[in-house]
């Protein structure tokens, strides 16, 4: 929706694709309102790239916006966009940049070659048991020296992902058997015996740096940091706040301002070094002792971009729209401003309101929304696809996607004010529904409310 | 009464003549028909003496005209003779040629495979006044004069397995084996372990069978025949045929599979395929032809059975003689056998152990020399000499390096190892005696080790790991289009973009893992590092040994289109530092069919691997079988190459076969299928005959996916299924873990 | 208890079902010259390995695919306007009128006669491996049901929970869902036949075999 809004704002025409079950959902209605029914195309599946290209060719599109998921980080999709007989413009970084930064090991190696701090451990797949054991031993000793009493080493399959083929090891004796288990798993299931060894970091804060760079990769700026440490079990973000730390209102055990400065500097340097050429996010973890480690790079615009935009000003003007920036940059327009032109003001909090049960492993809730409204405030912006808000009609939560209900961004002059407003918003929210068994629908509002006070803390 | 019987016989003879010559109009048979009818009409009026005279006359006329018709026989007529229900069968031979016999493992339809008949038989020979009963194992197909349950002599895999089992029994008992080939071809169902696989096993075992084997071919239909026909002496009945494919099958291929081939084309194909005994004798593929009576032997031609008996005894004697030598007098008599019945001279048929080895060597040489002129050799005289010389030198080199030098080295290093181990034990014991502390050594990590944790390791490798880049990228990846995976309906695969699919994905569906066929070059360059390989024998090119009409043109076209001289590429390359000999069967060259040139190239490659003690990989990019236009020159490659493989494996090598796309028929049923290490690339098909042929020959419908690699795996035909992208790694793994004792890098 | 005759009469008034053929995905559609009233064949061969008659082709990204008939029947209505045009996914191309066969009629009547076990909520359903194995090995009717027997796995929002069968004892006579497809709440999953009903069911089968005329 925000992508369409940004297109409309920039004066571009667009085509919106949808699948059968989505015909009634908010974004299809909005597209029809903004651009007319002629710009809607029903396709088989969002995951089938051929469908997008067929529609793009049939309706004569010039550029493709890959959205937030599926294709945004798929370098093959970006490559196909460029290398087809009828090439399109890809609203995102070049495909080779996506490929290099899409691989965590590559990212780590690039970072290390530039002196960007990364998690201690191997930066290439290890095939030799002796070498792996030696590394693990060094990591344990390193943690001991750092004063970490309960050291922990992660052994993971280099070709793995999604939590499979990962083991935590707490002492050296257990390492060998864990290594063999992971290696055998990798050999069997991934047909790649490579294994990564790295330190397991506990109790960290998850920070992100928002980067924007123009095509050609010559100029890059950042739009500040945000803190995404409030997450559900599956490491899904629930609250994001900007800026990443707030030394003004919270005491840290380390120099938070210089950490923020470090990670933004490193991120921008790295973006320039790899020739990054669109918006993207550099994800960091910061330990309780204030060490930042680069985790990975998201080569796409993320849902939480709004929280960074909310505290940023270009040449003193509010209303930064990062999606609009992304489209502009994707079409090859220059940045038109430098880092000095960007200033930051106040604090912002973004809540993701979902139908889920935080008490019960964040089990998604199914059911029907019967009431959903809130009091409008100048510091509040909420986006939702639930039509109940406008029409008051009950709405059945679709099954096949995450039960996202709304995204709320709260602005404040400083963090305490933003926090207070956020709590007020959540308290005043009128959200009710019934679940499949007839009981009240579970949402995560209480969970969000409880976590607001501890934002940006360790 | 007597007259009645004789007239009935005469009409039977006439009916037989009509059957043989089919619908063709024929003056002789018309004359006979007329005269017989005339006689039958007049018969009631004639007296006994007249009748007898008339019948005598008629019989004379029949004999005369049958002799005349004999000269008019076309190859297709001979096929009809062989298939005629009145044709002699193995049972007739057992009754009339052998003195005593007992059938083993079968009473009519109660048998593992009623088409395969196994019997222990004896031949009585005189030794002065004494009679010696010499035992033999008789194995062959029984057509049973048209008995339905015998499947016309088409043998299922378990029938062939049973035959093989009793060949091993004969080997244990040290008695000769007589095989009688009466088969139109193997029954193409893929029961355990697969039709092709069982024939391959038979061939492999027969290649090393240490007893004399004599085979007699009446109807030799391709692979089914080879399953029992690899012999020291191959005799052929004069009216039999020995062929790569039935004339109907050849005609169907010629005409294009969809259309029905007409009779004339079938006749022409029968002629072109050179399937008769005379042709095969001329090609050197059989040793002798046994003359049958005019128009083929029938069960009442007792004189013929006497000839047959003499011939098999003589053949067995010769084999035994060649292997272990006889007394000088008997040898002389054997050589000039004028007038002497071979069964009057006694030859002991059980071989001594040294003779058994000699037997194998002679068998090997015999098959090695076959079809030597059936291919085009473009090498200059100099090259040939150089190759011969190099071969000799390598032989000496291998002997020195691997047998003599290596033995001392092994002994020496064994000693050193022992001393070292002793010393270590000593040190360890001392250490613990002195109470030296070993624990707690991991404190105090040196700073350079710490810096390894946080700085870039191995900067020389470059910052980014580049995705596996294929050296050779398929031209199919240059087209901007999408391709649908055949499993899309069942697995929900999305359409794949051709540049992704044929480029980065190496032709593998990203969702279900289906393997699309790739060019053989993809394997040559991405798996076997062909760019740095040494190709040899490229000058040996496929020829047209039978002068098959129109084939020269097709062959030239294939050579032009592929730039290859034959469907086989042999080369020596290195895989992860280990030198290997690789042979590739290339599908685009006439369907990857194997003929004399391919067989010769394979044998030479195998010999090279054996002499240099290299592993030998055989990659079948796809093969449709034996090249039918080369007829029996092609079929004979099955035993020929299998013999070479057997020798290679016995000498301790590593022979590994990889199947891709579609591999069928002869090659799979012989030198490919006999490997103990056979692997398939995913989504390949392996089998004996395709579904269409199965339907035609057996009337059975086979389920879709009948020849899939996974089914071949569960049948026990192949040993594993590999992903194309992992081929190189798996082959390296095979080099490390599989194979015999005599590989140079061991 | 069950008026088989009445149901048969009811089915006889409209002895067919209409199958809408829709585009599986976007692309350019070409018809193959079929007209309304033409007969088409369903998938054939001993294992159903031969696809049904081609009804139209759809080309997307230079990849031409056939759209085949899923059942035999008669073409009733072709959207000729779409010839050569780019269409979206899920657009109706034509309708095939499929006349019910005896087996299908039996299945329809039995659906009313059997005791049905329905889906409690909209989700994807699977049999537990044990039951699945039995069905694959010996057919549906090899599974005996008991009250409280663990029979299904319910997959919803990528989370899987077991579901027990509740209802009368008997054997599974028919399965009404595709494993892995979404089933709406209240839709029948399986039809269970009690021992006492066996004669009734035999009766239905006999009557249909005798009375139903297959139209083609």
Image (cartoon, rainbow, N blue to C red):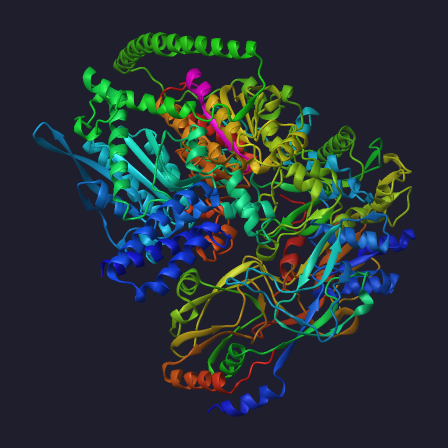
x%, y% of residue A229?
65, 46
Q: What stretch is highlighted in magenta?
A: B606-624
Identify the image quadrant of the C terminus of chain B: top left
Identify whether C62 is placed above or below B199.
below
Name the spot of residue B508 as percent of width and height, x first: 60, 42
Q: The N terminus of chain B lies in which quarter of the figure?
A: bottom left
In this picture, is C166 found above or below B613? Answer: below
Q: Is residue B613 magenta?
A: yes
- Is residue A453 in the magenta section? no
Front-lying residue, B563 or B148: B148
Q: Residue at x 48, y 83 (%)?
A: C209
Residue nearest the viewer, comparing C114 with C86: C86
Indicate left or right for B210 with C49 as reference.
Answer: left
Q: Is residue B153 above or below residue B518?
A: below
**Residue at 56% across, 71% down:** C121
Q: In this view, does C19 lie to the left or right of C171?
A: right
């Amino acid at each position: 929706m925000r992508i369409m809004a940004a297109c409309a704002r920039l004066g571009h025409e667009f085509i919106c694709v949808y699948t059968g079950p989505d015909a009634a959902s908010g974004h299809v209605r909005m597209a029809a309102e903004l651009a007319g029914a002629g710009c809607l195309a029903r396709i088989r599946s969002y995951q089938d790239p051929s469908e997008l290209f067929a529609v793009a060719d049939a309706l004569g599109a010039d550029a493709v916006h890959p959205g937030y998921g599926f294709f945004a980080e798929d370098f093959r999709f970006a490559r196909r966009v460029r290398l087809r007989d009828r090439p399109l413009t890809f609203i995102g970084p070049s495909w080779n940049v996506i490929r290099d930064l899409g691989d965590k090991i590559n990212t780590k190696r690039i970072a290390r070659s530039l002196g960007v701090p990364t998690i201690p451990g191997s930066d290439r797949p290890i095939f030799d048991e002796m070498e792996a054991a030696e590394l693990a031993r060094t990591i344990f000793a390193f943690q001991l020296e750092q004063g970490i009493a309960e050291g922990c080493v992660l052994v993971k399959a280099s070709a793995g992902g999604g939590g499979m083929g990962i083991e935590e090891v707490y002492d050296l004796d257990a390492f060998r058997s864990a290594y063999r288990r992971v290696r055998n798993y990798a050999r069997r299931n991934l047909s790649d015996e490579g294994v990564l060894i790295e330190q397991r970091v506990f109790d960290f804060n998850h920070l992100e740096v928002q980067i924007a760079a123009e095509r050609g990769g010559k100029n890059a700026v950042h739009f500040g940091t945000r803190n995404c440490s409030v997450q559900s079990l599956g490491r899904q973000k629930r609250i994001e706040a900007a800026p990443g730390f707030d030394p003004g209102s919270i005491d840290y055990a380390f120099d938070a301002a210089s950490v923020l400065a470090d990670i933004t500097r490193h991120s921008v340097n790295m973006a320039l070094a790899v020739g990054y050429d669109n918006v993207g996010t550099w994800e960091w973890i910061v330990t309780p002792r204030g060490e930042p480690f680069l985790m990975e790079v998201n080569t796409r615009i993320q849902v939480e971009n709004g929280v960074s935009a909310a505290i940023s000003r270009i040449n003193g003007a509010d209303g930064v729209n990062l999606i609009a920036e992304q489209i502009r940059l994707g079409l090859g327009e220059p940045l038109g401003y430098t880092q000095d032109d960007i200033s930051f003001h106040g604090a912002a909090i973004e809540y993701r309101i979902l139908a889920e049960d935080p008490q019960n492993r964040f089990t998604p809730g199914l059911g029907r929304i019967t009431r959903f409204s809130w009091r409008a405030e100048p510091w509040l912006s909420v986006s939702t696809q639930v039509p109940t808000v406008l029409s008051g009609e009950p709405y059945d939560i679709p099954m096949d996607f995450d039960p996202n209900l709304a995204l709320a961004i709260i602005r404040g002059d400083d963090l305490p004010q933003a926090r207070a407003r956020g709590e007020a918003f959540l308290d005043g929210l009128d959200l009710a529904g019934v679940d499949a068994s007839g009981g009240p629908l579970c949402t995560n509002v209480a969970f969000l409310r409880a976590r607001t006070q501890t934002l940006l803390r360790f | 009464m007597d007259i009645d019987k004789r007239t009935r016989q005469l009409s039977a003879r006439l009916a037989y003549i009509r059957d043989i010559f089919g619908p063709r109009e024929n003056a002789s048979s018309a004359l006979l028909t007329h005269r017989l009818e005339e006689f039958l009409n007049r018969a009631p009026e004639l007296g006994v003496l007249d009748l007898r005279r008339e019948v005598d006359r008629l019989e004379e006329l029949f004999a005369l005209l049958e002799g005349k018709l004999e000269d008019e026989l076309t190859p297709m007529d001979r096929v009809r003779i062989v298939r005629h229900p009145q044709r002699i069968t193995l049972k007739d031979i057992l009754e009339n040629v052998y003195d005593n016999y007992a059938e083993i493992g079968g009473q009519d339809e109660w048998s593992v495979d009623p088409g395969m008949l196994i019997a222990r038989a004896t031949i009585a020979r005189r030794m002065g006044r004494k009679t010696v009963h010499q035992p033999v194992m008789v194995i062959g197909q029984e057509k049973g004069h048209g008995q339905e349950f015998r499947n016309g002599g088409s043998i299922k895999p378990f029938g062939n397995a049973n035959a093989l089992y009793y060949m091993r029994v004969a080997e244990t008992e040290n008695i000769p084996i007589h095989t009688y080939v009466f088969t139109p071809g193997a029954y193409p169902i893929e029961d355990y372990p697969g039709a092709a696989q069982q024939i391959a096993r038979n061939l492999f075992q027969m290649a090393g069978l240490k007893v004399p084997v004599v085979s007699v071919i009446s109807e030799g239909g391709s692979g089914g025949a080879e399953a029992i026909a690899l012999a020291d002496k191959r005799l052929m009945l004069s009216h039999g045929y020995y062929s790569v494919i039935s004339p109907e099958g050849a005609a169907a291929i010629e005409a294009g599979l969809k259309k029905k081939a007409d009779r004339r084309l079938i006749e022409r194909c029968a002629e072109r395929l050179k399937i008769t005994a005379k042709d095969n004798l001329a090609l050197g593929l059989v040793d002798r032809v046994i003359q049958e009576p005019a128009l083929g032997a029938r069960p009442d031609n007792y004189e013929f059975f006497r000839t047959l008996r003499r011939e098999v005894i003589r053949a067995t004697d010769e084999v035994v003689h060649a292997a272990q030598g006889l007394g000088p007098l008997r040898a002389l008599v054997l050589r000039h056998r004028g007038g002497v019945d071979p069964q009057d001279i006694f030859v002991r048929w059980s071989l001594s152990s040294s003779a058994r080895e000699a037997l194998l060597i002679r068998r090997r040489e015999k098959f090695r020399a076959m079809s030597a002129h059936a291919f085009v050799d473009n090498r200059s005289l100099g090259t040939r000499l150089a190759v011969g010389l190099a071969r000799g030198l390598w032989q000496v080199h291998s002997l020195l390096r691997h047998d003599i030098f290596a033995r001392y080295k092994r002994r020496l290093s064994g000693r050193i190892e022992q001393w070292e181990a002793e010393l270590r034990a000593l040190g360890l014991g001392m250490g613990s005696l002195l109470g030296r502390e070993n624990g707690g050594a991991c404190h105090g990590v040196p700073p350079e080790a710490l810096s390894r944790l946080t700085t870039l390791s191995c900067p020389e490798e470059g910052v980014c790991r580049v995705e596996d880049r294929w050296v050779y990228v398929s031209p199919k990846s240059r087209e901007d289009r999408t391709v649908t995976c055949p499993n899309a309906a069942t697995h929900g695969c999305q359409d794949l973009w051709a540049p992704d699919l044929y480029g980065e994905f190496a032709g593998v569906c990203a969702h279900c893992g289906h393997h699309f066929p790739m060019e053989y070059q993809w394997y040559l360059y991405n798996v076997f590092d062909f760019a740095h390989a040494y190709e040899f024998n490229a000058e040996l090119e496929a020829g047209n040994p039978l002068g098959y009409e129109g084939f020269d043109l097709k062959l030239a076209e294939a050579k032009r289109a592929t730039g290859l001289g034959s469907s086989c590429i042999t080369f020596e390359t290195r895989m992860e530092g280990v030198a290997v000999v690789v042979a590739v069967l290339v599908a685009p060259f006439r369907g990857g069919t194997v003929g004399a040139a391919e067989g010769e190239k394979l044998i030479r490659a195998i010999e090279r691997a054996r002499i240099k003690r290299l592993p030998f990989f055989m990659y079948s990019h796809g093969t449709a079988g034996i090249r039918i236009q080369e007829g029996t020159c092609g079929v004979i490659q099955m035993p020929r190459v299998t013999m070479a493989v057997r020798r290679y494996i016995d000498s301790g090598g590593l022979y590994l076969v990889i199947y891709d796309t579609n591999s069928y028929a002869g090659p799979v049923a012989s030198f490919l299928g006999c490997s103990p290490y056979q692997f398939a690339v995913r989504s390949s098909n392996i089998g004996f005959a395709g579904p269409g042929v199965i339907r035609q020959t057996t009337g059975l419908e086979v389920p879709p996916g009948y020849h899939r690699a996974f089914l071949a795996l569960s049948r026990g035909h192949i040993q594993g299924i590999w992903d194309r992208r992992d081929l190189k790694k798996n082959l390296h793994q095979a080099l490390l873990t599989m194979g015999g004792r005599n590989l140079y890098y061991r | 208890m069950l008026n088989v005759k009445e149901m048969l009469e009811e089915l006889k008034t409209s002895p067919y079902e209409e199958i809408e053929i829709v585009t599986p995905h976007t692309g350019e559609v070409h018809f193959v010259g079929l007209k309304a009233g033409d007969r088409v064949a369903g998938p054939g061969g001993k294992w159903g390995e031969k696809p049904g008659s081609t009804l139209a082709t759809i080309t997307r990204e230079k990849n031409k695919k056939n759209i085949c008939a899923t059942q035999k029947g008669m073409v009733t209505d072709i959207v000729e306007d779409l010839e050569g045009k780019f269409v979206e996914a899920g657009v109706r191309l034509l309708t095939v009128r499929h006349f019910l066969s005896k087996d299908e009629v039996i299945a329809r009547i039995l659906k009313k006669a059997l005791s049905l076990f329905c889906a409690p909520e909209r989700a994807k359903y699977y049999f537990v491996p044990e039951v699945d194995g039995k069905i694959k090995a010996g057919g549906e009717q090899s599974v005996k049901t008991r009250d409280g027997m663990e029979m299904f796995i319910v997959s919803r929002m990528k989370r899987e929970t077991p579901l027990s069968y509740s209802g009368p004892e008997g054997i599974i006579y028919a399965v009404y869902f595709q494993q892995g497809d979404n089933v709406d709440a209240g839709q029948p999953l399986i039809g269970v036949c009690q021992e006492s009903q066996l004669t009734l069911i035999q009766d239905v089968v006999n009557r249909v075999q005798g009375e139903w005329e297959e139209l083609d």
